Image (cartoon, grey):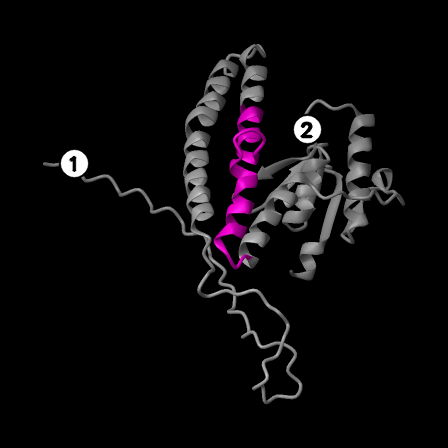
Amino acid sequence: MALADRFLTLGRDVHSGEVLARGGDPEAHSILERTGFVPVVRLHETYHRLPLGLDEAEEKRLATRAVARLRAVKYDVVTDHVFDTETREARYLPLGSQVAHLAEQIRDATTSDEVADALTELTASHDGVLIALGEVLAATAAFYQDLGQPPDPHTAKRLQYLAEHRLAVLWSDLAHIRNDLADRHQDHPQRRACTAEVGPDEREASAVCACPPPPPRLTTTPVAAPAAPAPAPPRR
């Protein structure tokens, strides 16, 4: 992580009057959003602002809290005097990080049973993560339904569609994969649990483990969607 990604500015913009935060890495952006800031994505930059319609006291409260949370995890924050604080607010593990821990369990898994156990947390039919996500979408749809603005019923229907169709397909596919792995009881041929024991035929006196070094993890870069084809010239 570049050193510049640990640096942010947070203050009131002299032109717009908005309280803006610029800089930081995805973790800092998550902290800002959890403190109430709204991401603004532009062609050449991404920054965060406080929501519209807040009074000055609420803006100060949220901005000061963001500074306290960012500095608590060692971000360098340059801020207006009115938002500066010596408070360092403790940060608790967010729900998303707990779910992401399932990925670490799967990366370290050596058997199909271990992966099935991790996927069960997503697919459990009563209290799995995907079932809970469906309830969140349904609850948000119900909130939008009678909110009073013209686009709101359309937004509610869109949320219902995502819950009933898109999310249902994802749950069905993952549940099938989980059940397949649960039936296999298979060791992964390229992975094995490390016993930290050295075999009797080991020649190196300094050896502490007989396991081969793990292969390097590959990082993938998102592939851009193909550009739409140019329209054909009109026929003469």
> Quick check: 53 above or below 215?
above
In the shown orientation, is residue 186 left or right of residue 75? left
Is residue 188 located in the magenta-colored stretch of the structure? no
Secondary structure at numbered mark 2? loop
Q: In which quarter of the image is residue 15?
A: top right
Disc 2 crowd, CA 10 A, few/some/many (<14, 14-19, 20+) = few
- Location of the N terminus by quadrant is bottom right
Instruction: Give amino acid for label 1.
Output: Pro
Span of residues in magenta: 109-137
Q: In which quarter of the image is residue 230?
A: top left
The residue at the point 77 percent across, 51 percent down is 73
Instruction: Give the residue at mark 1.
Output: 234
* Residue 134, horizontal then vertical, whole percent: 53, 27
State the CA–CA distance, disc 1 to disc 2: 48 Å
Disc 1 crowd, CA 10 A, few/some/many (<14, 14-19, 20+) = few
Instruction: Give amino acid for label 2.
Output: Pro
The residue at the point 72 percent across, 53 percent down is 7
- Location of the C terminus by quadrant is top left
* Residue at the outermost right position: 86
Of 199 and 74, nearer the camera is 199
In the shown orientation, is residue 172 left or right of residue 94? left
Instruction: Give the residue at mark 2.
Output: 51
**Mark 1 vs mark 2: which is more N-terminal?**
2
* Residue 175, horizontal then vertical, whole percent: 45, 38
> Quick check: 194 above or below 34?
below
What is the chief secondary structure element of the magenta stretch? Answer: helix
The residue at the point 59 percent across, 31 percent down is 127
Of 229 and 28, nearer the camera is 28
> Quick check: 216 above or below 22?
below
Secondary structure at numbered mark 1? loop
